[in-house]
Image (tube, rainbow, N blue to C red):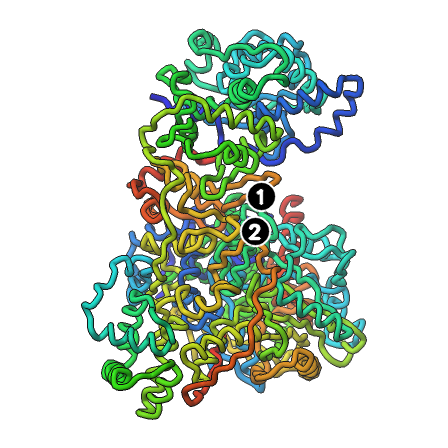
Amino acid sequence: MTKERHCPLVDLHVSSPNAMRLNRLMRMSRRDTLMTGMAGMGVLAAGTAVSAEPATGADPELERFMKVSERLTDRPSLDPRIGQALYERILQSGPERKAQLAKLADLLDGSSYDSASAFAKAAEQADPAFKDVIHDLMTGWYRGVANGKVVVYRSALMFDITKDAIYPKTYAAGGPFYWTTQPPEVDRPTGGPALSPSKFDVEPT
Amino acid sequence: MSSEQNLSADVVIVGSGVAGSSIANELARAGISVIVLEAGPRVDRQHFVDNFRNLENKPSYQGPFPSTPWAEHPPNQITPNKYLHTSGPNAEAYQQVYLRMMGGTTWHWAGCAWRYLPSDFELKTRYGQGRDWALKYDDLEPFYYQAEVMMGVCGPDPKVEDLGSPRRQPYPMEALPISYAAQQFRKLISEKTPYRVVHEPQARNTKPYDGRPTCEGHNNCMPICPIGAMYNGGYSVYHAEAAGAKFVPNAVVYKIERDSANKKVTAVHYYDPDKGSHRVTGKYFVIAAHCIETAKLLLVSADEKSPNGIANSSGHVGRNMMDHTGVQVTFISGDKALWPGRGPLETNVIDNFRDGDWRGDRGAYLVHMVDDNQVDFATQLAISKGYVGKALEEQIRYLASHTVRLFSHNEALPDPDNRLTLSTTHKDALGIPHPDVYYKLPEYTVRSCEHTRGLFKNLIGLMHGTDEQWTPGYFPQDHPSGSTIMGVDPKDSVVDGHCRTHDHENLFIASSSVFSTVGTGNITLTVAALALRVADTLKKELLHA
Amino acid sequence: MPDFKTVFWSFLVGGTVLGGLSAHAARAADVDQDVMNRGAYLATAADCVACHTKQGGTPFAGGLKIATPMGDIISTNITPDPDHGIGKYSEHDFEQALRRGKRRDGENLYPVMPYVSYAGMTDQDIHALYVWFMHGVKPVAETPPATQLSFPSNIRLTLSGWNMLAGSEKQETGDSATYDTLRRGKYLATALEHCGTCHTPRNVMLMEKSDQYLAGSPLAGWYAPNITPSKTGGIGDWSEDDIVQYLRTGRVKGKSQAAGPMGEAVEHSTSHLTDADLHALAAFIRQVKPMEDDADHQPRDGFGKANDAPDIRSGELTRIDNLSHKSPANLFDANCAACHGQNGAGTVDQYAPSLYKNSAVGAGRPDNLIMTILMGVNRTTADGHASMPAFGSTGDVQRLDDEEVASLVNYVSKTFGNGSYNVTADQVAQVRKNNTPH
């Protein structure tokens, strides 16, 4: 049923978005009920969630996750703060992930691998299901995405390895017109893939 | 019982995007009272920036803008889509996206600010295709300039680079220096082809302008400029408010009331988010609600006196839907590293296919080498190929520095069968029907796209490209137009050359919906220029009344 | 106690100024060009234009509204128009106004006019200024609205008492162009640039405390900091070249940037001084008496380092109408990090400056950080146009409310500064209220 009534909104023509916020708090309505599903979800943790250093050695599972991650990225060390956040989110992507990660760590402990590729190849041979787990790890560390959600954006490794040439969108730090200069040349890669290829769907805009 | 005493103004505008807010600004500055009714909410840039960074699918332009239940907009360009329902042979080519919120869709445009060519206004006369507009380039030229000043457009000196649209004034700002990648592309085109790459005119600051900073190349014009260096309708909202215009957010107009003779509009009615209804009276009314929502509103308002919808004695409301449907390809260049994505998104264009005698046979088009950061794309691609560790890092660097994306804006023609109607199956939270659109790409456009494909293949060869990925079919360029088409004859058009509806003397439409043909450049500057011309007409009539 | 310091500046000072004057100079063909040049230079050094031009107005035609605790004072037309400006002033009338604050009709000028400083000018320089104002400035036939103050400030006579108490600069003699470095520096600092007008604290009678010269003072929402050579409270860690660069360009990497009134002073005045004069001014400032500071106990530009925290995120989106407040770190990320970097390092070229090792952030007082966020930065010199959008109620890029600004200021101080701020939304509201253009 529609109802004719006076319009309080018109008084808000000069109000700021923040006045709108207050105004909305003052009156509960159906629309607020609709919103409660989303309220509070947007609290973003940039810089705060990580202010407490993860206690080293406190979580043996996390330590094993970091060891596997370091092997698969060919890196001697990775940021444990990101590692903790990724590990938590990757576990959320499926009930089997925890056991799979543990088994992958067992595999790494069981033998010595001199490169990420060697380890990944061996893992896929040992169990084809490891391919997805390794994809999760690569997507987590390099894209900063786990379980389909952004865990880190600016701090993802894909931006670390390209920082001599380009900035993450919205974080350009070159100053106006930096883009006119010549970026570094890049040689043709020599390494080959370690895992069997997967289907790549370009996400729609 | 009604709120009409509370809500009345000389001019009532529906929609707060670049068209509605710039009219409001002009009128308010002339001392005319204005109320702008915006279906969506007030918004904050910081929330969009934050949403963008939290968004997994970064190329999704709509992604950072999840709509409200009372002012839904399309969530993405996927077919089927839960708001804009398209059908027909080229349904996917009309999956347009736009935003319903204060400031409008220019929150996520790329700032491309083309003037149309003089020939664009007389396609029928010159090439025997489509229609002529009910105005000429020269009628619009002063308003083009006014729009360029309002937005802050940077562009090349016509003596150095003539873009084909005669100018009486230089661009308000110097052209944007193009990126290294664009410089290399420009060099290749100039050395290896008969074509040229020009500096695209852009509503983007190459110096501090109008309280906004210089562009810093965040490469995120779409979906959100994080620093406000690019113009959007939100600026005109602020300016109009400072001049005294009233903006009412969350006001979803659903009915247009006329006098007993059905000649003049007397009021519009809107729902608030709780479906409380409000009536707003005025002397003049402007519908500036985007091509799709404008036609939808006119159709939704049908009643006994106007059973086919408001301003629709011609039956053309919702018909003649057009776009710059495009062709897109991504490939890996075999030449030196380009590192696209340093600087703004769209800065350079091949403009050789904007005009020529061939327009009698096929549509015109623009080619953009999209200067888009490819790091995320490269990473996804390399992971999917099975790389890990150092080999993955090498791949990411190589792909990110060598990926090239080209896309085109191809010209459509008005075809009455390409039509927007009200959904009989889907309604929004307020009970207003969703829009349905039937779309079949005109053969004129298909031939244009084929020509573009040939050009792209040629360019891929010149760049020793591999791994080409063609976007299947045709893709929408979000330039919907034509749904309230302009013309001199009231029998086959909805508005006249001043964007006044033939049927209702005090009802104007400010939107790309009035375009008689879709033109050969991004649509926004022409939308703004037409809107400023509407403001000029209203000022003359109200101040000399 | 009234915050009288606000008298002297307004953030409203307009943009372009000195352009368009040369055309008129032709009229002065019969006048000694050396005297004209000297007068023009002195007018720049004394920054007359800052107050005597309204935003977007003709240079020296007045009309700028200057907010003071007594009410708004509107600057007058000092172009040589005989009816609307100072065209009927004799050189003696001109000298009396400049040095004594006396109008041609004998009334007292409001002490917004820094005549206690200009009293130090030499006769020769007063003459050059007079010649230039009469022949080098284009007459403008318009009278700005009259200042209307309420009782008792409107009684110009009461100012006589103040004038008797206020110590004026001692008049210099001889040819100021021939002074040695320190004398020249002192002359520039005191008689012309009137640095102390803003940077020297005032007593209950609103007079500059001469024993605390340049020790810092609040100013229209901003804080003109302690610029004595104290290593703890002042700028003792700045070299002469640092000061020269600051006055010429408005910025010294890793130290400070000029915004607000100082940005205007740099743009309109100090950036136009000769190299020799800038060095003289810097040399003089570096040898004034070092003063401790109540709030600054370490160099203001010595705090902070890059933040290395990764940007761990929720991955959740908020609906477009959900404008609820964000966490301080999130506010910084969404509003500041695009230019200043999430690590606070600024852009590579320091177009957007680093937030650590930055006086505006490391200062013991939050005033300048609050004002910079609310009002932005807009400063043009030969070095370029420094521009940061305003995030206050006049900004178009993003308007932040009082709580958000307070939250940001405290976060920035904690992350990149000395962490001492505890700014409340009420404080920001007060600053905003006092600085809303009207």
Residue B294 visible at all: yes
Q: Residue at x 37, y 69 (%)?
A: A150
Residue C22 place in picture, x, y as percent: 73, 29
Q: Residue at x 75, y 75 (%)?
A: B193
Kindly identify which chain the residue marked by label 2 belongs to: B
Q: Could you tell me if the residues under marks 2 and 1 are in contact, i.e. CB atoms within 8 Å? A: yes
Q: Residue at x 32, y 50 (%)?
A: A22
Q: How many marks?
A: 2
Q: Secondary structure at mark 2?
A: loop
Residue receiving disc 2: B214
From what the image shows, is residue B157 above or below residue C22? below
**Quarter of the figure with residue A54:** bottom left
Gap in angstroms between the C-alphas marked 2 and 1: 10 Å
Answer with left or right where residue C39 lies relative to residue B272: right
Residue A78 place in picture, x, y as percent: 34, 68
Image quadrant holding the N terminus of chain A, namely: bottom left
Residue receiving disc 1: C385
In this view, the residue in front, C49 or B508, is C49
Q: Amino acid at mark 1?
A: His
Kindly identify which chain the residue marked by label 1 belongs to: C
Answer with left or right where residue B377 lies relative to residue A177: left
In this view, the residue in front, A189 or A6, is A189
From what the image shows, is residue B259 above or below residue C397? below
Labels 2 and 1 within one chain:
no
Residue B201 place in picture, x, y as percent: 66, 60
Residue B301 place in picture, x, y as percent: 51, 68
Q: Amino acid at mark 2?
A: Thr
Q: Secondary structure at mark 1?
A: strand
